[in-house]
Image: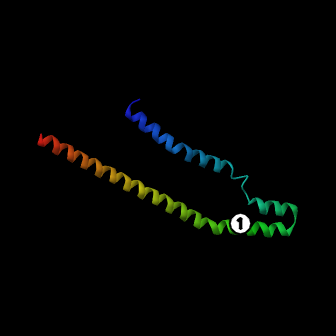
Amino acid sequence: MNLNNAFTYGRLQRWLPACAAVAITLLAVSTASACPSCKVALASQGQGDLVSGFFYSILFMLSMPFAILGSFSGYMYLLVRRARRYSEHLRRTENHLAESSSLNDSQ
């Protein structure tokens, strides 16, 4: 496998799950016309279930900013940790190379 094919395969492997998720979402649009709680409440003609549906949908909408912000913050934290670990690895490698070259020069 040459480098170009490996690069293309890596890109395909990275984008395939995202494309599959978008395709599934677009195919499921007709079935997701309303939240399940509200849909069941309207079908049963009871008002108690409708209030419950609104309650849970409001809780869900209120929790989303926290979930999104928490996910984004966690991802950024992991990126910073990975960058620090990589810079530490580079520093150790440079120090090791400098020590080995100074040992070779002294011999």
> Farthest top residue?
1
* Residue 37 horizontal/vertical position (percent): 78, 61
Q: Quadrant of the C terminus?
A: top left
Q: Residue at x 64, y 50 (%)?
A: 26
Q: Residue at x 46, y 42 (%)?
A: 11
Q: Residue at x 23, y 45 (%)?
A: 97
From this view, report whether residue 6 is shown above or below residue 98.
Answer: above
* Residue 71 horizontal/vertical position (percent): 54, 60
> Farthest right residue?
45
Q: Nearer the viewer, residue 64 or 75?
A: 75
Q: Residue at x 72, y 55 (%)?
A: 32
Q: In the visual, does 19 lie left or right of 78? A: right
Look at the numbered disc 1 and give the secondary structure of its residue: helix
* Residue 73 horizontal/vertical position (percent): 50, 63
Q: In the visual, does 83 lie left or right of 48? A: left
From this view, report whether residue 85 is shown above or below residue 44.
Answer: above
Q: Nearer the viewer, residue 65 or 89?
A: 89
Which amino acid type is shown beneath numbered disc 1? Ser
* Residue 56 horizontal/vertical position (percent): 73, 66
Mark 1 packing: few (<14 Cα in 10 Å), some, or many (20+)?
some
Which residue lies under the disc numbered 1?
57
Q: Quadrant of residue 52?
A: bottom right
Q: In the visual, does 16 lie left or right of 92? A: right
From this view, report whether residue 84 is shown above or below residue 66.
Answer: above
